[in-house]
Amino acid sequence: MIDVIVVGCGPTGLMLACELRLHGVRVVVLDRLTEPSQESRGRGLHARSVEIMDQRGLLDRFLAVSDRFRVGGFFGGIRKPWPDGVDTAHPYGLSTLQPVTERLLTERARELGAEIRRGSEVVGLSQDDGDEHGGDGSDGTGERAGVGVELADGTRLRARYLVGCDGGRSTVRGLLGVGFPGEPSRVETLLGDMETTADPATVDAVVAEVRRTQPRFGVIPNGDGTHRIIVPADGVAEDRTATPTLEEFRRRLREVAGTDFGVRAPRRLSRFGDATRQAERYRVGRVLLAGDAAHVHPPTGGQGLNLGVQDAFNLGWKLAAAVRGWAPDGLLDSYHSERHPVGARVLENTRAQITLLGTDPGATALRGLLAELMDFEEVNRYVTEMITAVGVRYDFGEGHHLLGRRLRDMELERGRLYGLMHTGRGLLLDRTGRLSVAGWADRVDHVVDPGGELDVPAVLLRPDGHVAWAGEDQADLLGRLPGWFGAPVR
């Protein structure tokens, strides 16, 4: 039996496959496409995703093919300088086209032993009754409880768990019958990568003028001789899946900008709306949802790809713990309780941004007011940490101010903190030398290091880098370890 089937070979599914393989979980990734898509809706990684790649030893691969950018705020078309004091050792984003991100994560997943099957479309799904809270439940016949999958070609597969990472029109979510409440699209935007024949200086001048009143408009160099064209559509198409034509782009450019820039040779043409929806449940028994399968929202602020990668980073080690048999009660359910509020928060801020991007006098006035407020460093920093997900804090209850936050990278006597996290295990960073994780050494690394910037005696980090405990009392630590890392080995 396969341990985990991941449906969807985008950034979310590939990141999840990498995380599962770090723990020896047998994972098969299914995707209906026979070849990787060259469509690039996601154009980069925000600071928290940059941290994630560093925590898993992947950052150098991304730096080799990406340009850094530093834009503060980046909210509703408002751009400010990067603020001081953002809580990260990686105060930048990376301009990385989505096909490049997928290529790098595919390479890593295969290096780790993940199996990727393209041209495999899921059309049927069933799961056994019984143990749906982790562990090695049996269906009563001696066979482990699990999930049955039927593919379009008649192939049947069986796994202990399945994760739907198959996009906003998720087949997995539909087969589960999970509600996807929210709002339909009210406005639509055309998006295309194509060549322009207009003089670059003319393009820049026109864009600057048009954006004074139409912040949803843009012409952005792709770095390969083409430009990304973003222009408001004329209403919302009846068939949202219909690809716009080049002539539609030309017409809208002339209507909005007074010129079509001589666009030609389109590489990719698509449309997106401002629909905002979120799955009611991220878990139903042994089936889970992540990425766009769990939430869709406008791409304002560039948060979509990053939110999915961060979903996978939260889920991977928890699902591996369930497969390996050491997950404590409630660990797998904490994926929903932690990530659903984060997703809801992103939906809220994208709704606000769509309002700010409006062209009516009220939206224009509101955008101007917020731009003034973001000149205050504290406001700019708050918005920047929200958009980049650096400010995410999970609710672990009362305790130290670090509890629930992810810990920034820092220099230690033994090297960099993130350099110690490449294996995906928990980590006790101990400045005292008096603590112990005996009984959990197969799941938690113990690093004694008195150096670094840490202002507490010790911290216990989950595999995703969030602080599960802080202090110096051994008994207190022993009370916290089982809740995240299960029973000790005796």
Image (spheres, rainbow, N blue to C red):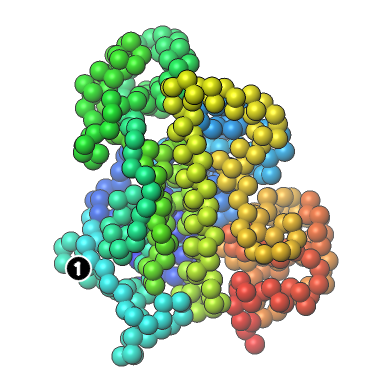
| Residue at 47%, 39% in the rendered image | 350
For residue 14, side relative to residue 479 (left or right) = left
Residue 29 seen in render: no
Is residue 199 left or right of 82 when viewed as pictured?
left
Quick one: 417 or 306, which is closer to the camera?
A: 306
What amino acid type should be assigned to the residue bearing mark 1?
Thr
| Relative to 105, residue 161 above or below | below
Residue identifier under label 1: 155
Residue at position x 34%, y 51% in the image: 167
Give the SS element for disc 1: loop
- In this view, the residue farthest toward the front is 362
Find residue 5 and report its horizontal and vertical position in percent: 35, 66
Q: Is residue 117 above or below residue 96?
A: below
Residue lying farthest to the bottom in this orientation:
141
At horizontal 74% and vertical 56% (from top left) the residue drawn is: 401
> Percent from the top left, x then y, of residue 28?
35, 64
- Left or right of 171 on screen, residue 298: right
Q: Is residue 306 placed above or below 318 in the rendered structure? A: above
Whether residue 299 is visible to the viewer of this picture, yes or no, is yes
